[in-house]
Image (cartoon, rainbow, N blue to C red):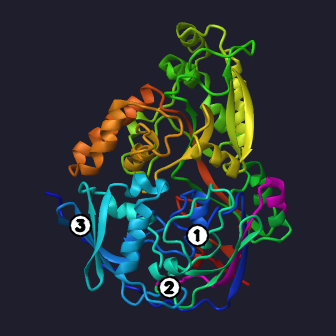
């Protein structure tokens, strides 16, 4: 029987207000795609809209779950978790948060393709008391409370009033649902304006239920995709803080009076994904340009060859300038289910790579296209070009196709229409059970399984773990499932894992902005001194 888990409500301590109010101007690489908290789970977008929307379960700066809109939770049997809600919470429009709002939000989010891996196992949510909600799943799912750190709560009456009961499709031509530009959450900041290409503006929620330890009254986020322009904005004082500080500018910022660098390992890793199941690979040809027969990426020997051809340490040393850690397994330290004994990268071995390609029937290699997301991650264009140079040494000619993030995302979401691409990944629940179910299990659009498996990778051992973990409570059994799955994925090269990057922010000396492993800037914790 699953041991009951009970989390006591945190005691809210009244903190003295900072001496003076302040406004923050900050910038990042890409815009927030929407203010609807269930329409996408893009990391940048989520980090921005979570300023306005609280989650059912909270997260500390150490990425541990804590009371949020729910003060406690317990497993009550029959695949049911009961969440007791916080009293006297109001939405930004002044209306009270009710259990019905929580039920509405859970049922809305669970049907989102972007959240299937997290919430797809939920069968129903029901009001179970004056101020509690029961969540009934198809399995006990011992990490469900951790998943609820991504369950953002909306007002049901507000959604009904503005015609957004259904989640808007961001990919639809001309889509302009009300929730894309507007928000009504319970969070520490109220949304004032969201002009995707220009700015997103927040103001302090004076009626916030929780601690507001910083002194911000207003914050404006600006997307500045070009790295030199972003750095120049910080150095000129145009902005107070930039996330995704280009690593080539770290030394410059550190040596400039009045500004500083803050770094922390990100719970996230970069990988090259290879087409696992298509009969014919996209944008892949013989060296003479003629159509290639079949899909070379389906052959595990080709996948292994490319893995041995990539010198991940050289990419970390030269492209990332040491601001990353080579990874050899899906996962990083700090994530639930991480397998340290498997975390060893494939040996860089050009001769072995050539031999494997020849054995697979490609002694002269082939030509292909590497789709590369520009701006979204640190130094992606440089990473892609380094990969192309490394693969050329084993006879694989690579054309780098750079795409801005919205275009790259549409290519995957509306297809996926890529056989070889670079992407960053990490579990939304900060447990690798989520990685298995979301990005590695066999993709089945009808069942909404493996929705983020853009590589179309398929492995029965991985599928078994993904389907068994949510109903497995015993920790030793869970660890065995994780180990078997990630060992199989590494041996068959589910993807070519590259590195775990550092979160790198640049800011004025006057700014105190604690970082978190999910790269979220929490505006309520930011203090600007005079």
Q: Secondary structure at mark 3?
A: loop
Q: Which residue is disc 3 drawn over? A: 5
| Viewer-closest of 378 and 110 | 110
**146 w.r.t. 10: above or below:** above
What range is drawn magenta here? 210-232
Compute the Cα span from label 2 to label 3.
29 Å
Q: Residue at x 55, y 70 (%)?
A: 50
Answer with the quarter of the image where residue 10 lies: bottom left
Q: From the viewer's perspective, is 169 left or right of 152?
A: right
Specify which label sits upstream in the sequence, 2 or 1.
Answer: 1
Q: Which residue is disc 1 drawn over? A: 49
Q: Residues within 10 Å of mark 2 (few under 14, many from 20)?
A: many
Specify which label sits upstream in the sequence, 3 or 1.
Answer: 3
Q: Residue at x 30, y 37 (%)?
A: 464
Residue 427 on the magenta segment:
no
Q: Residues within 10 Å of mark 3 (few under 14, many from 20)?
A: few
Q: Secondary structure at mark 2?
A: loop
Quarter of the picture holding the C terminus: bottom right
Q: Secondary structure at mark 1?
A: helix
Query: Whole-percent x and y of residue 357?
Result: 57, 12
Query: Whole-percent x and y of residue 147?
Result: 39, 60
Residue 220 visible here: yes
Q: Residues within 10 Å of mark 1 (few under 14, many from 20)?
A: many
Query: Whole-percent x and y of residue 418?
Result: 62, 35
Specify which label sits upstream in the sequence, 2 or 3.
Answer: 3
Q: Which residue is disc 2 drawn over? A: 91
């Amino acid at each position: 029987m699953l041991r009951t888990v009970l989390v006591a409500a945190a005691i809210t301590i009244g903190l003295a207000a900072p001496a003076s109010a302040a406004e923050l101007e900050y910038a990042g690489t890409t815009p927030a795609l929407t203010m609807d908290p269930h329409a996408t789970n893009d990391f940048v977008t989520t980090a921005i809209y979570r300023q306005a929307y609280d989650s059912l379960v909270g997260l500390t700066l150490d990425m541990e779950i804590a009371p949020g809109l729910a003060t406690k939770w317990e497993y009550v049997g029959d695949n049911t978790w009961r969440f007791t809600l916080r009293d006297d919470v109001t939405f930004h429009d002044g209306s009270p948060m009710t259990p019905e709002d929580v039920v509405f939000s859970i049922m809305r989010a669970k049907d989102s393709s972007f959240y299937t891996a997290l919430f797809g196992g939920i069968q129903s949510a029901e009001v179970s008391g004056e101020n509690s909600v029961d969540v009934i799943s198809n399995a006990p799912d011992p990490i469900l409370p951790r998943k609820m750190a991504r369950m953002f709560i909306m007002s049901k009456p507000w959604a009904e009033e503005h015609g957004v009961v259904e989640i808007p499709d961001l990919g639809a031509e001309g889509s302009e649902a009300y929730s894309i530009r507007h928000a009504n959450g319970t969070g520490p900041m109220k949304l004032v304006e969201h002009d995707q290409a220009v700015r997103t503006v927040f103001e302090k929620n004076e009626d916030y239920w929780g601690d507001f330890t910083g002194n911000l009254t207003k914050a404006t986020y600006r997307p500045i995709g070009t790295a030199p322009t972003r750095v120049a904005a910080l150095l000129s004082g145009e902005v107070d803080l930039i996330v995704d500080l280009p690593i080539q500018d770290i030394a410059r910022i550190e040596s400039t009076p009045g500004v500083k660098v803050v770094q922390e390992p990100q719970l996230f890793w970069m990988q090259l994904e290879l087409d696992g199941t298509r009969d014919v690979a996209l944008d892949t040809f013989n060296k003479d340009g003629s159509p290639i027969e079949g899909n070379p990426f389906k052959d595990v020997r080709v996948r292994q060859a490319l893995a041995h051809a990539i010198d991940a340490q050289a990419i970390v040393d030269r492209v990332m300038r040491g601001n990353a850690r080579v990874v050899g397994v899906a996962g990083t330290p700090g994530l639930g289910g991480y397998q340290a004994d498997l975390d060893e990268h494939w040996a860089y071995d050009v001769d072995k790579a050539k031999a494997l390609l020849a054995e697979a029937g490609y002694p002269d290699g082939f030509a292909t296209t590497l789709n590369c997301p520009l701006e979204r991650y640190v130094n992606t264009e440089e990473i892609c070009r380094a990969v192309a140079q490394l693969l050329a040494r084993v006879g694989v000619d690579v054309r780098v196709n750079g795409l801005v993030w919205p275009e790259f995302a549409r290519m995957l979401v509306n297809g996926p229409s890529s056989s070889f691409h670079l992407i960053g990944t990490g579990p939304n629940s900060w447990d690798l059970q989520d990685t298995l179910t979301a990005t590695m299990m066999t993709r089945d659009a009808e069942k909404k399984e493996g929705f983020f498996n853009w590589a179309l990778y398929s492995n029965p051992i991985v599928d078994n773990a993904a389907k068994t973990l949510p109903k497995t409570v015993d920790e030793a059994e869970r660890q065995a499932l994780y180990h078997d799955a990630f060992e199989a994925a590494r041996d068959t090269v589910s993807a070519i894992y590259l590195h775990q990057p550092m979160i790198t922010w640049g800011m004025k000396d006057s700014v105190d902005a604690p970082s978190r492993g999910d790269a979220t800037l929490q505006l309520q914790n930011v203090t600007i001194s005079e």
